[in-house]
């Protein structure tokens, strides 16, 4: 059986055969936030199902693809469709594409997600720059044998989200007159949304938002020495005692409505990298 590094090498070799450019920026987009791809001058699209060793999609006809191209004058690779732990993928499968990005030459990863607000000052449609995270039952994807060629056994997590990129993004938001919140993202497994008691617990623990993605990808990126910037769109306010029902449709709609603001900040940030 191939080792993980051998698998990654085969995946990377296949992608390099298909696409000549070397991306330095990787982009992972959240639910309802896929239109950002429209900002790209697309060079090559590769379906996940064609890429050796890529996780196989659990949803038929919804396999997703890696998209290579440029934003401004920067070479980027974007994931159209990410892998969630709640879909039944192992944590190692969830982070496989992030590791592939590293092998391809990516130095900076930009991540977006839809998240529930647990900070009472937040409103639906707010953008939140993630300044830190709490992994709350999101299984650590580095459990098991360490891949020494990827990164250290015990990675430092004192600054998972680059302070320099956060400062840049805040300046950009101000210039574009887009209000942004800053806060702590709490990663959960899902697929249930939280109970009222859980939203309250997450708030007491120091979370400002809660969602079902991102944390495992960020851990993998930090382990591999890449810098990370991540932003949430607040799609619901679970902490509210009243009007506390949440649907996936509502989440997607709120994400789509807020997307142009997120796209503007990501695009400018990429230009300044
Ligand atoms: N909880 C968890 N994940 C989410 C939520 C939420 O309230 N909203 C969007 N993703």
Image (spheres, rainbow, N blue to C red):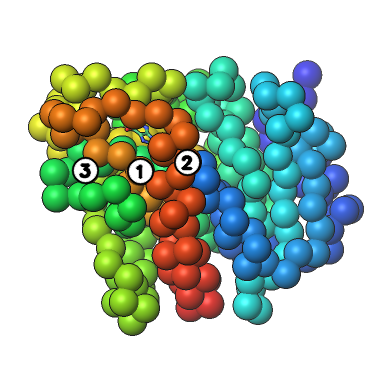
Toward which corner of the image does residue 197 lie, by quadrant? top left
Where residue 51 sits: x, y (%)? 80, 38
Q: CA distance from mark 1 to mark 2?
A: 8 Å
Task: Tell which tag, 3 or 1, sits nearer the viewer.
Answer: 1
Q: Is mark 2 within 8 Å of ligand 1?
A: no
Residue beneath disc 2: 252
| Quarter-of-image position of residue 76 | bottom right
Q: Quadrant of ligand 1?
A: top left
Q: Kindly report the distance in space between the C-alpha atoms of the residues bearing marks 3 and 1.
A: 13 Å
Q: Tell how many labels.
A: 3
- Near mark 2 (Cα within 10 A), the count class, few <14, some 14-19 or many ≥20, is some
Q: Residue at x 37, y 35 (%)?
A: 211
Label 2 residue SS = helix
Q: Which one is in front, 29 or 259?
A: 259
Residue at coordinates 52% horizontally, 45% vertically from top-left? 32
Residue with the mark numbered 1: 235
Does the CB distance between marks 1 and 2 fall below 8 Å? yes
Disc nearer the start of the sequence (3/1): 3
What residue occupies the far right of the structure in this picture?
Answer: 17
Q: From the image, tell me which residue sits under label 3.
A: 208
């Amino acid at each position: 059986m191939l080792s993980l590094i051998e698998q990654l090498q085969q995946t990377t070799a296949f992608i390099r055969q298909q696409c000549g450019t070397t991306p330095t920026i990787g982009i992972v987009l959240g639910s309802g936030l896929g239109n950002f791809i429209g900002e790209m001058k697309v060079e090559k699209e590769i379906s996940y199902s064609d890429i050796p060793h890529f996780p196989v999609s659990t949803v038929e006809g919804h396999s997703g693809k890696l998209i290579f191209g440029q934003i401004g004058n920067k070479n980027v690779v974007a994931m159209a469709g990410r892998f969630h732990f709640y879909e039944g993928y192992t944590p190692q499968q969830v982070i496989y594409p992030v590791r592939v990005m590293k092998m391809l030459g990516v130095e900076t990863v930009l991540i977006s997600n839809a998240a529930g607000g647990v900070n009472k000052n937040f409103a639906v449609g707010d953008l939140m720059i993630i300044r830190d995270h709490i992994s709350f039952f999101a299984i650590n994807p580095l459990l098991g044998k360490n891949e020494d060629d990827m990164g250290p056994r015990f990675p430092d997590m004192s600054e998972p989200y680059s302070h320099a990129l956060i400062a840049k993004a805040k300046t950009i938001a101000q210039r574009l007159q887009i209000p942004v919140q800053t806060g702590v993202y709490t990663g959960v497994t899902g697929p249930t949304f939280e109970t009222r008691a859980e939203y309250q617990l997450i708030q007491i623990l120091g979370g400002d938002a809660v969602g079902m993605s991102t944390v495992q990808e960020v851990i993998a990126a930090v382990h591999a020495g890449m810098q990370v910037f991540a932003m949430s769109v607040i799609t619901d306010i679970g902490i509210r005692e009243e009007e506390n029902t949440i649907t996936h449709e509502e989440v997607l709609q709120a994400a789509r409505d807020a997307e142009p603001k997120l796209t503007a900040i990501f695009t400018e940030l990429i230009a300044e990298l």
